[in-house]
């Protein structure tokens, strides 16, 4: 690869800077990616916070538990459709561009979420109501499956190799904030309106907000240019015509990137979903305390992410994540094994360790994926490697943890599930070698380097 001070001549597919003001373009790119990402995950997460109201309106039953389970089944269904969304939109991002794909998935997510707020209920149109709800959730799942891989590729390709961890950490932060805004909106409305009004019509409001919020994010994303790396691929004629086929020829990369996400999937949904169950059933906290501890934990983790993301750019990212996964082998089992009977101060110490571990690991694991995947199939492989473990080990986390507790009668039994996920990721990170990290082709490297020099 040519030295950054001596870029390849212009005859090598034009190495002139692609944009006259890279810093301005980068700021707009990060704003557009993160604003859309936050709204994607607000839209995607708000259903879970309104599950009880959705059950009453779309799955009425003489057994309230059966209705709630049906509502949660629809929630889980959107997770299992995410890998398919990744297989549809990851290749689209690698073939026609990151920007067009980001616009498409955001339009799908905002539109389907807004439509949920307009759906007639079971009492109005009968069985067609849950059918329409399932279709809307499937569209949400497809969209979420396409968002993560595309947004990750877009952001890392604007940030450059030396700022990948910090830049990608903001995507994870905005995803967490999107969940938090969804929680705050849903719970705030329930407190203001009361259960009766919330059940009758108030549940629609958080979904309808997706319309104007999505319109703002779409407007911002329309103003973006595609990533300099994708434009370099276009310029050099290195666009991959069949990203899925190309990815299938890299089984080692697929295995390592998949396994690297397994712990992220379990610890993310431990903190964001199952924690509330644990606080109620094991620690006997009241609903107000559960809400504050759950929200506070997510907010604290989000604040840590840019710090740890920046740290991953300064040290060996793989070794930092390996240390975090080894810590996960200790902190997550200890949280379950030691919290029963623990005093509140001791319990919060265990919780602090888990949440800190979550902030550290999740901050930059997607940046590690980008380090291992060639740019021409980056969105495709990130989409597969992220969404498949999320479907298998993330969305199912509350279900598996609850099932283990019920079958064994032991509230500490989920410890072994979470230990298993941490061990899978630890082994994968140990297996990753220096030769696994991607060196981009010389032409692509020269074009990107030419742009980066403008920011120095």
Image (cartoon, rainbow, N blue to C red):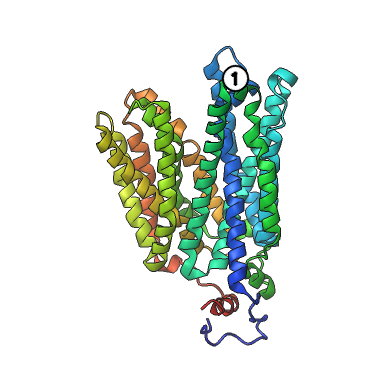
Identify the residue at image location x=33%, y=31%.
413
Residue that lies at the very extreme toward the front in this rendered image: 192
Identify the residue at image location x=59%, y=40%.
44
Residue that lies at the very extreme toward the top in this rendered image: 62
Quadrant hosting residue 14 = bottom right
Q: In this view, does 348 lie to the left or right of 203?
A: left
Label 1 Cα crowd, 10 Å radius (few <14 / some 14-19 / many 20+) = few
Which residue is denoted by mark 1 in the rendering? 196
Quadrant hosting residue 198 = top right
Q: How far from the left and from the top, in percent, is residue 425? A: 39, 50
Q: In this view, does 269 lie to the left or right of 220?
A: left
In this rendering, does residue 298 appear at all? Answer: yes
Q: Which of 334 and 202 is in front in this view?
A: 202
Q: In this view, does 352 lie above or below 235?
A: above
Element under disc 1: helix
Q: How far from the left and from the top, in percent, is residue 322? A: 35, 56
Q: In this view, does 234 lie above or below 114?
A: below
In this rendering, does residue 92 appear at all? Answer: no
Q: Which of 258 and 286 is in front in this view?
A: 286
Identify the residue at image location x=70%, y=48%.
215
Q: Nearer the viewer, residue 305 or 396?
A: 305
Q: How many marks?
A: 1
Q: How far from the left and from the top, in percent, is residue 122? A: 69, 20
Quadrant hosting residue 446 = bottom right
Identify the residue at image location x=37%, y=40%.
418
Q: How far from the left and from the top, in percent, is residue 239? A: 67, 67
Q: Is residue 411 left or right of residue 36?
A: left
């Amino acid at each position: 690869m040519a030295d950054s001070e001596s870029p390849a001549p212009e005859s090598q597919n034009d190495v002139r800077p692609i944009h006259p003001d890279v810093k301005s373009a980068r700021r707009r790119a990060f704003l557009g990616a993160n604003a859309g990402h936050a709204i994607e995950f607000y839209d995607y997460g708000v259903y879970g916070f309104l599950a009880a109201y959705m059950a009453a309106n779309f799955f009425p039953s003489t057994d309230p538990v059966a209705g709630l389970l049906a509502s949660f089944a629809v929630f889980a269904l959107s997770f299992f459709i995410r890998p398919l969304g990744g297989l549809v939109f990851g290749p689209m991002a690698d073939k026609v561009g990151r920007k067009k794909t980001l616009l498409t998935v955001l339009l799908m997510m905002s539109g389907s979420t807004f439509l949920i707020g307009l759906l007639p209920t079971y009492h109005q149109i009968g069985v067609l109501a849950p059918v329409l709800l399932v279709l809307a959730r499937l569209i949400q799942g497809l969209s979420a499956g396409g968002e993560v891989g595309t947004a990750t590729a877009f952001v890392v390709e604007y940030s450059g190799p030396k700022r990948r961890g910090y830049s990608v950490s903001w995507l994870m932060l905005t995803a967490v904030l999107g969940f938090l805004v969804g929680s705050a909106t849903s719970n705030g409305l329930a407190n203001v309106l009361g259960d009766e009004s919330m059940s009758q019509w108030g549940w629609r409001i958080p979904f309808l907000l997706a319309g104007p919020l999505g319109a703002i994010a779409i407007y911002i994303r329309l103003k973006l240019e595609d990533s300099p790396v994708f434009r370099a691929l276009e310029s050099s004629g290195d666009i991959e015509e069949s990203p899925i086929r190309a990815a299938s020829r890299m089984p080692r990369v697929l295995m390592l990137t998949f396994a690297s996400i397994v712990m992220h999937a379990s610890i993310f949904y431990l903190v964001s979903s199952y924690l509330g169950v644990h606080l109620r059933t094991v620690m006997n906290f009241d609903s107000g305390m559960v809400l504050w501890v759950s929200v506070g934990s997510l907010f604290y983790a989000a604040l840590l992410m840019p710090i740890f993301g920046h740290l991953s750019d300064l040290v060996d990212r793989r070794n930092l994540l390996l240390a975090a996964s080894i810590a996960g082998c200790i902190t997550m089992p200890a949280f379950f094994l030691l919290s029963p009977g623990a005093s509140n101060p001791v319990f919060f110490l265990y919780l602090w360790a888990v949440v800190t571990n979550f902030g550290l690991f999740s901050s930059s694991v997607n940046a590690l994926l980008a380090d291992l995947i060639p740019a021409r199939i980056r969105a495709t492989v990130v989409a597969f490697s992220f969404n498949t473990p999320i479907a298998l080990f993330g969305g199912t986390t509350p279900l598996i943890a609850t099932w283990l507790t019920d079958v064994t009668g032991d509230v500490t039994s989920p410890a072994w599930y979470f230990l298993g996920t941490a061990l899978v990721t630890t082994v994968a990170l140990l297996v990753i070698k220096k030769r696994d990290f991607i060196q981009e082709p010389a032409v692509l490297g020269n074009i990107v380097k030419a742009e980066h020099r403008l920011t120095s």
